[in-house]
Amino acid sequence: MQLTVPSFCMILLVGPSGAGKSTFARRHFRPTEVVSSDHCRALVSDDENDQSATGDAFELLNLILTRRLQRRRLTVVDATNVQPEARQSLLELAGQHRCPAVAIVFDLPEAVLNERRKIRTDNRAFGDHVLHRQRKDLWLWMQYLEFEGFKRVYRLRSVEAVDAAELVRS
């Protein structure tokens, strides 16, 4: 699948933990283009798994995103973004900067997510119930993504689709 994105846009990677968002971001974008909630959590607490640092991490993420959009730089937000509340403030920020927003949705089967969680090496302490909730939120709200203000929405439904995705900047 070919994913065509404007040369200046904000891209939200949307999907449960373990869906391959960070790997996809590393494969298709420069490190400077990706703003990761995990990385911001690590910057403020020295531990990307420290959930108590989430508020500070997203404050930092929004600051970085604002500065990049002011400079009209393509910016990728690497976070779960499965709930509309998480996307709303990001979309508002894009709107303030007249920046088109693109969603790339990682809609992988729950069995794949659970298997990946079991083999993770980053010591994330969450169970299958967390992935189930994230996937349920994704499915509940996915049908409304286009109405939230995204210019384009791409949906990747399998590991093969994620691996085969080709990103084209227009």
Image (cartoon, rainbow, N blue to C red):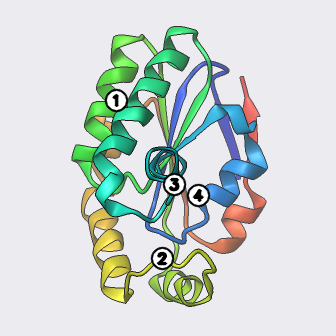
Type of amino acid at the residue the image marks with label 2: Arg
Tag 1–tag 4 contact (CB < 8 Å)? no
Residue 25's x, y, as percent? 67, 49
Q: How many marks?
A: 4
- Secondary structure of the residue carrying tag 1 is helix
Q: Label 2, on which residue?
A: 124
Label 3: few (<14), some or many (≥20) within 10 Å? few
Q: Label 1, on which residue?
A: 91
Quarter of the image that includes the C terminus: top right
- What is the spatial separation of the Cα atoms under label 1 and label 2, in whole angstroms? 28 Å
Q: Is residue 120 above or below residue 37?
A: below
- Secondary structure of the residue carrying tag 4 is helix
Q: Which mark is residue 21?
A: 4
Label 4: few (<14), some or many (≥20) within 10 Å? many
Mark 3 vs mark 1: give the one in front: 3
Type of amino acid at the residue the image marks with label 3: Asp
- Identify the mark nearer the N-term, 3 or 4: 4
Mark 2 vs mark 3: give the one in front: 3
Residue 131's x, y, as percent? 38, 78
